[in-house]
Amino acid sequence: MASATTAPLDALPPTAPRSGLFGFTRAQGIALVVMLAAIVVLPFFVYPQFLMKLLCFALFACAFNLLIGYVGLLSFGHAAYFGMGSYVSAYASQSWGLSPELCVLIGGAVGAGLGLVFGWIAIRRAGIYFAMITLALAQMVYFFCVQVPFTRGEDGIQGIPRHALLGMIDLGPDMRMYWFVAGVFLIGFLLIHRVIHSPFGQVLTAIRENEPRAVSLGYRVDDYKLLAFVLSAGLAGVAGGTKALTVHIATLIDVNWPMSGEVVLMTLLGGLGTLFGPVVGAGVVMAMETYLAPFGAWVTISQGIIFVACVLAFRAGIVGELAKWLRVKL
Amino acid sequence: MPDALPPTKTDTLLAIRDLQAWYGESHVLHGVSIDIRPGEVVTLLGRNGAGKTSTLRAIMGLTGRRTGSVMFEGRETIRMSPDAIGRAGIGYCPEERGIFASLNVTENLMLPPKVRDGGLDVPTIHQLFPNLKERANSPGTKLSGGEQQMLAIARILRTGAPLLLLDEPTEGLAPVIVQQIGAMIREIKQRGFTVLLVEQNFRFAQTVADRHYVMEHGRVVDAVANHEMASSLDRLHAYLGV
């Protein structure tokens, strides 16, 4: 008989057969091909610096979506993991001279470590209380970053070098950095897809849909939620770390609460609980911020209007509504 | 408290003594005592609000606070967490069935962790519930009420839990499906599973159970062996208001 102390992963059901290739449905497969094509072709037409930032935020939104879309937990403090990932990766690159893949990994590890502690505290509560606890903890991280010397306060860490990938390929030129960022994004994206379609992901889905039922079937749901939280925070740290190397700067903006709000906006706009929604949402929000920048405060106002329109008119988000309309899973 | 359980040497599988439970401030169970022997099918009868569902939830540890004693296979579970109780070998099938809508039939079936050997394998489950085989790839939302109920029961049969708590499995189902569920309960009894069944419909209960407990106001007020059912009808009518 399985004892109560068995780790939850021991008892996972074997993977149920899924239609499609690598767990992608046909529609998802087509969308993936389109996305890959866009990643390959777009840098020749669009400013690569913009695309790199976009991919970093897309990964951040995907990581956030793993938590809200598949576990049903609204974290309002994801800036903490993103921002700390960004700072630590920046510091590792500038002060220790580590190669970019290590900096990004360290950023991810710090995000995950922070996620483990914060998640452990927050998952005991649900709904608005969960959101408020994550926000409060994230603001503590913000004030920590304001105070400690290594973040250089209001100035932030500037002029971050990129160094050479694996000590061999210099990532100084933007196009080389672009392929690195695209690689990091794709690894994160596919990892999230794999997690969602694993037996572990099915238990997460079960928890989101009917938590008491998942409990009485014998799952320790807190362990599952925590693991998902750590994964999400870790990937947010990776996204933050990559972003710092991309734009050569890590500042308090990355770790402050509007960043947490922005990732909520990206995910909602693209479509909660869809695979491609956060990517599209990040694209739209980033495009607005970049191309509306000359209009100053209009960025915020138009973001607000879009957010209201999204909540009132198309709640499933861009990709969610599209999927509904085409009757496919995206 | 009356008890229809004759003195016996057989070990009880589930022995509940003075189980009290609360939802917040509201005291819903006032000292329930029940014994269930291995291989029995026992029903809890009673009107709406008598505490039948609360008894099942309290056994699973899903009520807010509970006191008393719930011994399962000689092991005290009153202080165990709900997931540990599930893993100890009690399978619970709630009234709302709890089919996960985003998962398909096979995924729903495979989701619960195996708690011990002796559960039914998938071919056997498909033999017992042919509908589930046909609809293996249908999403949980696309099932009829009867199919959902079968899936909810089937997935706990797979886990190997020897004791099944079924909460009104026949509610809202067509008579022909109710008959199928009855046949299925008799079948799993033959295979050695023990069942605690909550029912409003005592005519259905009569066709599957060995014994019946009657509940009123959060207490067990009577116990009737199935073969005494006919002679106790007047009493039951009075309790159940039917």
Image (cartoon, rainbow, N blue to C red):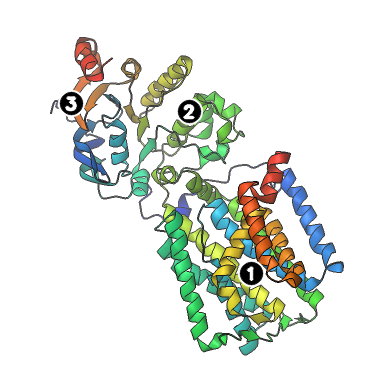
Q: Where residue A239 is drawn, which disc sits there?
A: 1
Residues marked 3 and 2, same chain: yes
The residue located at (47%, 60%) in the rendering is A131
User: Is B147 situated above or below A230?
Assistant: above
Q: Residue B1: which quarter of the image?
A: top left
Label 1 secondary element: helix
Local crowd at mark 1 within 10 Å, few (<14), some, or many (≥20)? Answer: many
- Give yes or no for contact between labels 1 and 2 (Cβ–Cβ under 8 Å): no
User: Is B8 situated above or below B18?
Assistant: above
The residue located at (46%, 33%) in the rendering is B152
Give the residue type that dot 3 points to: Val
Residue A52 seen in this snapshot: no
Q: Which residue is mark 2?
A: B150
Question: Of residues B29 and B137, which is closer to you in this image?
Answer: B29
Of callouts 3 and 2, the N-terminal one: 2
Label 2 secondary element: helix
Q: Chain of mark 3?
A: B
Nearer the camera: disc 3 or disc 2 = 3
Q: Residue B242: which quarter of the image?
A: top left
> Does residue A228 appear left or right of residue B2 in this picture?
right
Give the residue type that dot 2 points to: Met
Give the Cα separation between the discs numbered 1 and 2.
Answer: 45 Å
Q: Which residue is mark 3?
A: B221
